[in-house]
Amino acid sequence: MDAKEYLLSLLAILTGLAISDMVVSLHGLLRRFRQVRWDWLPVAAAILIFAVIVSSWWVSWNSSWEGMSPLEFMIVLGQLIGLYLAAKAVLPDDKDEDRLDLLEHYQRSNRYVWTAMSAVCFFMIAQAVYSGSAFSDPVRFLVWSSPFLVYAGISLMLVWVQRMTLHRIVVPVMLLINLIEASGQHIQSPL
């Protein structure tokens, strides 16, 4: 195995754990469907995080991992850990409570979720800075990094502003933008 295969294996494990946790949480919610007070906002946030996880995994197939330093590896690992933490917190774990309120869970956990997602963006920008692309072609770096800066800023705004009306506007817009961007990417099969 070469370095890329080792890194892709680790990416697959962490991505699989994140998706697995989300599926287990969804299973618990569906199993107790009538005991859950449903709300679309936490469901939209979960779909957004799921879409980010899947698209980041797809992008990793097209990346060149040759010559990666240990620090750059740690930066990539930070991105994955941030995604895992967001995935772990976005939906409630299956508990033996009589009733489960999804909006109440979202209100308790959204700061954690959006802090993790903003950290993912900052790790992505750090990776570009560390690789030197920020200095070799600053204009290209700014064009590439500006969506991550905006996404991090919006995520931090969701951390600080706890008005659910704002969350009900911003989260679906972020989901829609992510889905439009993902549909425009042409993924080459690794096979």
Image: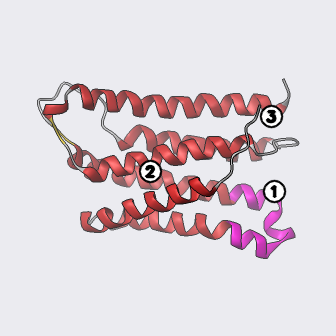
Q: Residues within 10 Å of mark 2 (few under 14, many from 20)?
A: many
Eyeballing the image, is 71 above or below 16? below
Task: Say left or right for 22 vs 55.
Answer: left
Q: Nearer the viewer, mark 3 or mark 1?
A: 3
Seen from the viewer's position, the closer of residues 126 and 83 is 83
Task: Give the x, y percent position of residue 50.
Answer: 47, 43
The quarter of the image holding the N terminus is top right
Residue 48 shows which numbered tag? Answer: 2
Q: Which residue is mark 1?
A: 131
CA gap between label 2 and label 1 equals 28 Å
Task: Say left or right for 30 vs 22.
Answer: left
Residue 176 counted in the magenta span: no
Task: Give the x, y percent position of residue 64.
Answer: 82, 44
Residue 4 shows which numbered tag? Answer: 3
Report the span colored magenta: 126-144
Residue for point 67% across, 30% down: 10
- Disc 2 marks which amino acid? Leu
Residue 130 counted in the magenta span: yes
Is tag 3's residue or tag 1's residue first in the polypeptide sequence?
A: 3
- Disc 3 marks which amino acid? Lys
Task: Give the x, y percent position of residue 20.
Answer: 46, 28
Magenta span: chief secondary structure: helix
CA gap between label 3 and label 2 equals 27 Å
Seen from the viewer's position, the closer of residues 54 and 83 is 54
Look at the numbered disc 2 and give the secondary structure of its residue.
Answer: helix
Q: Residues within 10 Å of mark 3 (few under 14, many from 20)?
A: some
Look at the numbered disc 3 and give the secondary structure of its residue.
Answer: helix
Eyeballing the image, is 49 above or below 19? below
Is tag 3's residue or tag 2's residue first in the polypeptide sequence?
A: 3
Q: Nearer the viewer, mark 3 or mark 2?
A: 2
- Disc 1 marks which amino acid? Ser
Look at the numbered disc 1 and give the secondary structure of its residue.
Answer: helix
